[in-house]
């Protein structure tokens, strides 16, 4: 019996991979990886067989039950089996289904955490998700739910928190904005949409909750994260006219 490593690949940039994840990839015999894992990250698994099992919203994807079976079967053949997931495996990665399948088959496994999209997006914005006296609670939610799942009241979590990070929400921007405003969140709540956080092609869009549908239309096809809350005021604040004049004067002197 081999061992299965459920590894977080981080938000995209290869140099945000943890040292433990890097070391395991170098020893891997086989890697089952998500669609958005960076080629340089996959390149660390030089001696491994690589199998794409990624899921993208609105596109053909590998069934979760099939992935579970492949992991169990691989552990009976190979010594080091890696399931490489974007971000952190334990956040919106369906890792619990894989854990349950491995436990039923009595396969040894280990979870290797990764940098998640929420913290990567906050880093791009140059803000802290928590702030003394302003934000003492953060919620991570997704409005998406699979067919047959129980009702997902994501909005209740967003309304209860000081700061919210919404995963996989760009495609539902109009519904998200309308629902939160209908349930009492101010349409002027500061908001940012971060696409492809940590990668060279990243894009950042600033606005308010009412602007979310427009901002989502400006975004491309990369993975996007929506951040909402008063802590974002620092990221979207515009300099005053006096400050701009002062900066221009300094530049002229230089």
Image (cartoon, helix red, strand yellow):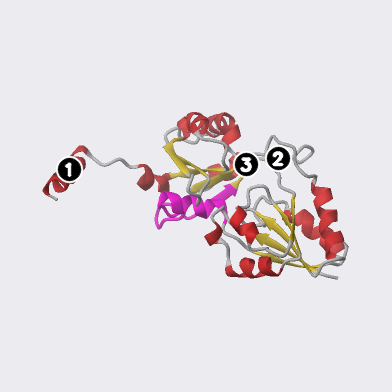
Q: Which residue is mark 3?
A: 154
Work out which residue is located at the far left of the displayed protein and give it. Answer: 253
- Mark 1 and mark 3 lie on one chain; the one further toward the N terminus is 3
Q: Which residue is mark 2?
A: 145
- C-alpha separation, residue under disc 3 versus residue under disc 2: 10 Å
The crowding category of the residue bearing disc 1, from other C-alpha atoms within 10 Å (few below 14, some 14 to 19, many at least 20), is few
Q: At 44% from the left edge and 50% from the top edge, which residue is drawn?
A: 124
Q: At 78% from the left edge and 56% from the top edge, which residue is drawn?
A: 98
- C-alpha separation, residue under disc 1 versus residue under disc 3: 46 Å
On the image, the x and y values in percent for residue 96 come to: 75, 56
Residue 123 as seen in the image, left or right of residue 62: left
Residue 183 belongs to magenta span: no
Residue 229 as seen in the image, left or right of residue 19: left
Tell which of 89 and 176 is nearer to you: 89
Q: Nearer the viewer, mark 1 or mark 3?
A: 1
Tell which of 34 and 152 is nearer to you: 34
Q: Please, what secondary structure does the residue beneath circle 3 have?
A: helix
* Marking on residue 248: 1
- C-alpha separation, residue under disc 1 versus residue under disc 2: 50 Å
Q: At 82% from the left edge and 70% from the top edge, which residue is drawn?
A: 2
Q: At 67% from the left edge and 57% from the top edge, which residue is drawn?
A: 90
Residue 131 belongs to magenta span: yes
The crowding category of the residue bearing disc 2, from other C-alpha atoms within 10 Å (few below 14, some 14 to 19, many at least 20), is few
Q: Please, what secondary structure does the residue beneath circle 2 have?
A: loop
Query: Magenta segment, which residues?
Result: 116-140
Quadrant (top left, top right, bottom left, bottom right) of the N terminus: bottom right
């Amino acid at each position: 019996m081999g061992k299965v490593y459920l590894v977080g690949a981080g938000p995209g940039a290869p140099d945000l991979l943890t040292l433990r994840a890097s070391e395991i990839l170098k020893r891997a015999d086989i890697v089952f990886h998500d669609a958005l894992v960076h080629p340089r990250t996959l390149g660390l698994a030089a001696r491994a067989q690589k199998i794409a099992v990624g899921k993208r919203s609105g596109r053909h994807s590998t069934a979760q039950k099939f992935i579970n079976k492949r992991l169990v079967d691989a552990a009976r053949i190979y010594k080091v089996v890696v399931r490489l997931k974007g971000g952190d495996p334990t956040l919106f990665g369906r890792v619990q289904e894989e854990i349950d399948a491995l436990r039923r088959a009595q396969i040894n496994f280990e979870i290797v955490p990764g940098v998640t999209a929420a913290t990567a997006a906050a880093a791009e914005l140059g803000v802290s998700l928590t702030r003394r006296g302003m934000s003492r609670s953060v919620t991570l939610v997704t409005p998406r739910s699979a067919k047959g799942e129980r009702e997902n009241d994501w909005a209740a979590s967003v309304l209860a928190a000081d700061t919210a990070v919404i995963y996989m929400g760009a495609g539902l921007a109009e519904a998200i904005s309308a629902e939160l405003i209908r349930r009492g969140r101010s349409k002027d709540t500061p908001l940012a949409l971060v696409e492809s956080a940590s990668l060279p092609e990243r894009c950042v869009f600033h606005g308010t909750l009412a602007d979310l549908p427009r901002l989502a239309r400006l975004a491309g096809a990369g993975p996007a994260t929506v951040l909402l809350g008063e802590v974002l005021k620092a990221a979207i604040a515009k300099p005053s006219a006096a400050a701009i004049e002062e900066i221009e004067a300094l530049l002229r002197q230089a």
